[in-house]
Image (cartoon, helix red, strand yellow):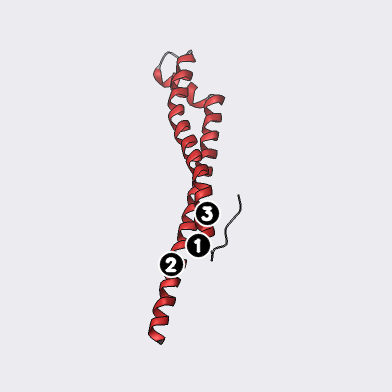
Amino acid sequence: MSEYVPNDPQAAVDYMLQTAPRFAKAKAQRLYLEEFRKTKKALLMRASDGKAVADREAYAYSHPEYIELLDGLRIAIEAEETFRFKLKAAELHVEIWRSKEASNRAEGRATQ
């Protein structure tokens, strides 16, 4: 996927169209991991030998599999946010172009 030229609104729109599916996939991954985190905690608490709920919860939160899941969630959030901000930047470039075009038209009318 190529980057777009900021002064080319069509390239910005094309970029948004190309990036949207990647953003959606990143967001879906983040949401999945957020939900799976609850399942993983429950599974690990069940596997614990602790008698008290606090002991089982401490076991789950400190388990390497839970920590690995949190690392995956961090990566998923980073990917989602990167795509979100890139899409927002492309939208802003289109808006800036639109404003410049409106200003150019107003200037043209004023000089006639």
Q: Is residue 42 visible?
A: yes
The residue that disc 2 covers is: 98
The residue that disc 1 covers is: 9
Q: Is residue 48 visible?
A: no
In percent of the image, x 46 and y 31: which residue is there?
A: 32
- 10 Å neighbourhood of mark 3: few (<14), some, or many (≥20)? some
The residue that disc 3 covers is: 14
Seen from the viewer's position, the closer of residues 74 and 23 is: 23
Of the two numbered discs 2 and 3 on the same chain, state the one appearing first in sequence.
3
Quarter of the view holding residue 110:
bottom left
Of the two numbered discs 3 and 1 on the same chain, state the one appearing first in sequence.
1
| Label 2: which secondary element | helix
- 10 Å neighbourhood of mark 2: few (<14), some, or many (≥20)? few
Of the two numbered discs 2 and 1 on the same chain, state the one appearing first in sequence.
1
The type of residue carrying mark 3 is: Asp
Cα distance, mark 3 to mark 1?
A: 9 Å
